[in-house]
Amino acid sequence: MPSLLHPVLPLSSTPKPLLFANSPAYDGPFSSDSQRPKSLRTITAISKTKSETRINKTEDDYHATLKALNSKGRFPRKSLGQHYMLNSEVNDQLVAAADVKEGDLVVEIGPGTGSLTNVLVNSGATVLAIEKDPYMAALVMERFSSLDCVKVLQEDFTKCHIRSHLSTVSQSGRNSSGVKSQYAKVVSNLPFNISTEVIKQLLPMGDIFSEVVLLLQEEAAVRMVDSSLRSSEYRPINIFINFYSDPEYKFKVPRTNFFPQPKVDAAVVSFKLKHPEDYPPVSSAKSFFSMVNCAFNGKRKMLRKTLQHICSSLEIEEALVSAGLPSTSRPEELALDDFVRLHNSIVKA
């Protein structure tokens, strides 16, 4: 486990507390004598031509976040999992982790005040930002209104038709901003409360996305990347993630970099998506994951018990042996390749 926990590159001091207009002083997690974090290069777009984007570099720190939220009279909404990034260095590192380059097409989920969007555009990307909160969507629209390489959709990502939207942006982007990549990327400071749902939606899209880089709750990030057998955290989501991608833990982001400060630290994880032709060879992904989920319904039980609804215990034992596995195997003892062989053995039977 320790090998996964690479610390984030040295960050600047923790920012001062935010004070909202017409509200009592916020006595939250940031000490009053903390120094303001160093802001790396960020941008405010001022014009756009077909061949290039002209930008005016400005700071995008916690003061900018405060000003942006006050402009809409907004407080972070717990129901939407809103925690705003206060350290621009983290945004730079997040974009660097995705290796965003000139001409890339990037989907950002939950842009908030647009601080990460700024860094993505400054890297030369065309951005499709999808924001559920109508007030924040309006804020980002206004902020990038003069720049046609940013499109903002006021929608719930988990319910939107991302393929259709991405196709539209990709076609218009090739004409106006020189989008070059066949595959898009996802880079997002994701609300913690929808992370698993978003991951399940995105990872099977290796035909349109090359990489998904997300800032997640650290505990969930470690659990998703570390698929150690026989561990208490080994679950069907590990099989799912490794079926569709190659995950990598990038770096830790302390909770003090967010407003409001969450109860847990965060971490950045990269999922390199596999192309459909590189998925493990199963006759049906639907039946495969149905088998995996059923197997884990009794995690400590033998598979010949938990999979009895598929076929008899004797047939399960025979399928296990045919797959090169002990007849007494339990789900926590099987890696992705083991489940693939078992599924194929059952199908043949």
Image (cartoon, rainbow, N blue to C red):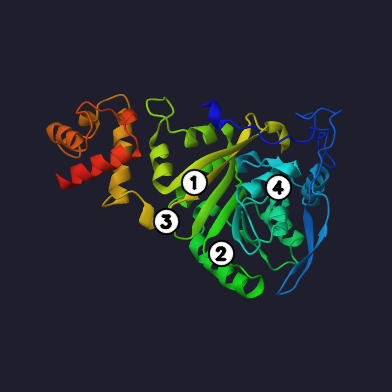
Q: Which mark is residue 92?
A: 4
Query: As rendered, which of 279 and 263 lies closer to the eye?
Result: 279
User: Circles 2 and 1: CB distance less than 8 Å?
Assistant: no
Sequence-wise first label, 3 or 2: 2
Identified by mark 1, the residue type is: Ile
Q: Which of marks 2 and 1 is in front?
A: 2
Residue 249 is situated, as x and y percent measured from the top left of the image, at: 55, 38
- Where is residue 51, by image quadrant? bottom right
Q: Name the side, left or right, on which 85 lies relative to 60.
A: left
Alpha-carbon span between mark 2 and mark 1: 22 Å
Residue 273 is situated, as x and y percent measured from the top left of the image, at: 47, 51
Identified by mark 2, the residue type is: Ser
Query: As rendered, which of 197 and 322 lies closer to the eye?
Result: 322
**Residue beneath disc 2:** 181
Sequence-wise first label, 4 or 2: 4
Q: Which of marks 1 and 4 is in front?
A: 4
Residue 210 is situated, as x and y percent measured from the top left of the image, at: 51, 55
